[in-house]
Image (cartoon, grey):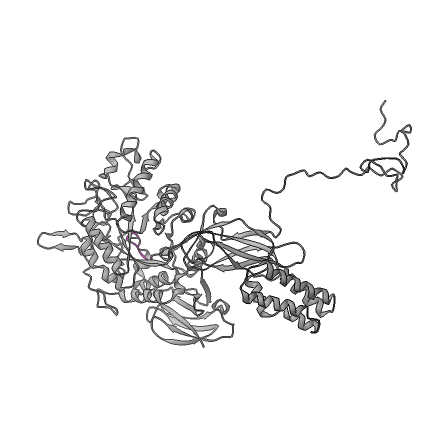
């Protein structure tokens, strides 16, 4: 029968003696455990069981690099000169000094090293503020590295003071500086500094303290901070950065319906006469005089007659009603044509030239939808959705119905639609348009927009796209990630202090790496209850917040006139301009106002002047909120250090209650203003001209009887 497991066979041969010839890997030592049994055989030499890491961390691990959009699949965005923070976690084993750098890679492949700072000293969080000086496709990465100079400084400072290995530490410092001079390219003055420090470190006629001090001078440390000796450099993956022209981030927009500019009602014929591109061009001087940068045109294409909408979105339109310009297409053409009432392409070219001469860019409305009369409907019925009864489905957004509009269906012939839309866009680019406001992009495939924007950018990288997507956050953010430079937002519906502050923290935080918000108090489709009932104070308040919170904001024409009457049961204006002509009888705008027909024009001008005078408002990520005792009063600041070293700092205090004056205390976060908690400074109100002395805690009183918003420029004593 078999022997029991673990029982020694007494007939086994004797173990080999110590002098027996045995292989080192097979020889068994003649030892006995404390329990009296033989020790187990030594294991054979370990053999690797896996390949080297496929994504090695590197000698100095770098993790969590930000900004990073969709794990690096999409580019982070900035504009020329815009500063933003790159941060990462960088660490190493042991106690030697670790350091980190951002490497910016230009479109031409040039690498620029930017030093990073450890913001939680002794731990692992590193950041640097960077900017790009030219448009194009950039890249960036973070490199972790061992810092032999910082390691020596730490060790030598301790040991020399304690007279431990003093000569050894001084010699090691000299060798580190010799390496730094030999291995890193630097100007002659930098080399001279390091060589002199090496000589002084080895000068035995000086005291140890004097010799050590020569290696620690501010000049030596500054030279090695700018051109460091870097060992064990461990890079993160390269991340893409799209740098665009400034208008992609900054701009004051003014929206018009060209057909209303110059329109009038003829009492003799009892018919409306449409405005034209020529009469709309006459309005450009007034728009430019208010300080706007972009004039945005609602659709100027032919309008269909099938299911044409009448006044206030009714279905009982007459032949004299113009219809909605968003019901695009008729026998006169489609998206590549101009409505005959407005003029010709020659007239359009003249309009664009007049705008450019006044410093205005022209933004076109791109609304990818069709009237039943659009040429595409007959030529490409497969581009639309056919219902079970054989009819083409019209647009709906329950309870709203748009019987005069057929949405495109991208499922049946995507290649055909892609090519046709690309052709249409090129038509308008060829006529001087560089900005497109896209109507309802969230109702079209995201991958279509990704393709279209990228394809246009190949030949026209300066074209800008604004997404009019009042929809779920995921869609809004994704549209921004795939290419839209700007996006409408929920600003119109954010009225409470906590809502605005929460929203601004979102928009100016990580989302700012790819999404640029555009704030509009009203549009031709939106007139919120706050604007309907808040009175003039509400209109000044909301214009000011839109203009000062974010770099891009927009005003819908008629805002100056406080057009606040709503269609019953709807958040849109009564006698909506989308369905009928409007004769506002504009007078030429002059700064300071010219009566009832100017209204809030002077206020919009002042806001736009402030925006131009203060570059700090051209950035989004520098928004900082401050505490206020009253829940109806908000305070925020924007601070920017300019190229000449001066600071541009604004503090805005706004009473969000349009009905009542408010008195309260503002408590400033002084370090966010670049000051000590005990500092005092002067603030000048850019609206009223009043000057005050401020510090950490400040009393304010503001509201409809005075001013709803203080815009304070900061001047240090």
Please state if 266 lies on the left or on the right of 208 as rendered: left
Query: Looking at the image, is 379 positioned above or below residue 476?
Result: above
Please state if 256 lies on the left or on the right of 611 as rendered: left
Q: Which residues are magenta?
A: 520-526
Q: Position of residue 326 (x, y in %)?
A: 26, 46
Identified at 30% across, 43% down, the residue is 368
Q: Is residue 248 magenta?
A: no
View extreme (top): residue: 1
Q: Position of residue 282 (x, y in %)?
A: 20, 59
Nearest to the observer: residue 209 or residue 691: 209
Magenta stretch secondary structure, dominant: loop
Nearest to the observer: residue 487 or residue 86: 86
Nearest to the observer: residue 110 or residue 279: 110
Can residue 408 be seen here? The reply is no
Identified at 63% across, 62% down, the residue is 178
View extreme (left): residue: 268
Q: Is residue 525 magenta?
A: yes
Classify residue 416 by image quadrant.
top left
Badge count: 0
Please state if 479 lies on the left or on the right of 210 as rendered: left
Q: Position of residue 165 (x, y in %)?
A: 74, 65
Nearest to the observer: residue 78 or residue 319: 78
Q: Quadrant of the C terminus?
A: bottom left
Q: Quadrant of the N terminus?
A: top right
Q: Position of residue 187 (x, y in %)?
A: 53, 64
């Amino acid at each position: 029968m078999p022997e029991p497991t673990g029982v020694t066979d007494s007939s086994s041969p004797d173990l080999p003696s110590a002098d027996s010839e045995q292989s080192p890997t097979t020889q068994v030592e003649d030892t006995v455990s404390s329990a009296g049994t033989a020790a187990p055989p030594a294991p054979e030499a370990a053999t690797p069981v896996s390949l080297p890491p496929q994504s090695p961390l590197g000698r100095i691990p770098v993790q969590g690099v930000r900004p990073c959009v969709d794990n690096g699949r999409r580019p982070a965005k900035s504009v020329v000169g815009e500063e933003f923070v790159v941060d990462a976690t960088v660490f190493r084993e042991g106690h030697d000094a670790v350091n980190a750098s951002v490497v910016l890679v230009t479109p031409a492949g040039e690498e620029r090293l930017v030093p990073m700072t450890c913001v939680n000293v002794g731990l692992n969080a590193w950041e640097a503020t960077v900017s790009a000086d030219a448009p194009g496709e950039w890249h960036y990465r973070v490199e972790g590295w061992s810092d032999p100079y910082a390691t020596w400084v730490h060790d030598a400072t301790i040991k020399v003071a304690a007279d431990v290995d003093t000569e050894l530490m001084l010699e090691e410092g000299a060798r580190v500086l010799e390496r730094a001079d030999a291995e890193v390219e630097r100007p002659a003055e930098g080399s001279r500094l390091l060589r002199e420090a090496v000589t002084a470190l080895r000068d035995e006629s000086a005291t140890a303290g004097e010799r050590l001090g020569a290696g620690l001078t501010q000049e030596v440390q500054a030279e090695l901070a700018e051109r460091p000796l870097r060992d064990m450099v461990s890079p993160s993956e390269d991340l893409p950065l799209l740098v665009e022209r400034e208008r992609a981030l900054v701009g004051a927009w003014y929206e018009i319906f060209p057909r209303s500019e110059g329109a009038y009602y003829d009492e003799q014929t009892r018919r409306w006469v449409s405005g034209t591109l020529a009469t709309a061009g006459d309005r450009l001087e007034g728009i430019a005089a208010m300080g706007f940068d972009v004039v945005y045109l609602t659709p100027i294409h032919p309008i269909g007659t099938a299911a044409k909408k009448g006044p206030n979105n009714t279905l009982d339109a007459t032949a004299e009603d113009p219809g909605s310009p968003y019901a695009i297409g008729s026998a006169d053409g489609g998206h590549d044509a101009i409505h005959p009432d407005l003029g010709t392409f020659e007239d359009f070219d003249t309009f664009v030239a007049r705008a450019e001469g006044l410093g205005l860019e022209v933004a076109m409305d791109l609304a990818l939808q069709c009237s039943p009369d659009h040429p595409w409907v007959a030529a490409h019925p497969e581009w639309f959705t056919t219902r079970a009864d054989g009819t083409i489905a019209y647009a709906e957004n329950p309870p709203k119905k748009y019987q005069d509009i057929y949405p495109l269906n991208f499922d049946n012939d995507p290649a055909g639609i892609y090519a046709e839309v690309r052709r249409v866009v090129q038509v308008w680019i060829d006529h001087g348009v560089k900005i497109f406001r896209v109507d309802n992009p969230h109702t079209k495939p995201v991958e279509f927009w990704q393709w279209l924007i990228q394809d246009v950018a190949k030949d026209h990288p300066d074209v800008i796209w604004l997404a009019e997507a009042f929809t779920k956050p995921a869609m809004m953010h994704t549209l921004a990630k795939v290419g839209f430079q700007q996006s409408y937002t929920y600003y119109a519906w954010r009225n409470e202090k906590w809502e605005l502050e929460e929203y601004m923290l979102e928009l100016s935080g990580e989302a700012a790496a790819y999404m640029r918000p555009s704030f509009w108090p009203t549009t031709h489709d939106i007139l919120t209850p706050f604007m309907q009932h808040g009175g003039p104070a509400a209109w000044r308040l909301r214009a000011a917040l839109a203009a000062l919170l974010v770099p891009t904001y927009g005003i819908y024409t008629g805002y100056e006139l406080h057009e606040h009457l709503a269609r019953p049961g709807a958040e849109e204006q009564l006698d909506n301009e989308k369905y009928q002509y409007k004769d506002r009888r504009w007078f030429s705008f002059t700064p300071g106002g010219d009566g009832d027909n100017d209204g809030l024009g002077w206020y919009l001008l002042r806001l736009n002047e402030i925006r131009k005078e203060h570059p700090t408002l051209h950035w989004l990520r520098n928004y900082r909120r401050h505490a206020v005792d009253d829940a109806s009063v908000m305070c925020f600041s924007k601070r920017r250090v300019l190229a000449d070293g001066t600071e541009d700092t604004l503090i805005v205090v706004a009473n969000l209650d349009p009905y009542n004056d408010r008195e309260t205390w503002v408590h400033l976060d002084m370090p966010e203003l670049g000051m000590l908690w005990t500092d005092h400074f002067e603030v000048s109100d850019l609206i009223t001209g009043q000057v005050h002395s401020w510090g950490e805690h400040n009393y304010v009183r503001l509201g409809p009887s005075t001013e709803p918003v203080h815009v304070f420029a900061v001047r240090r004593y």
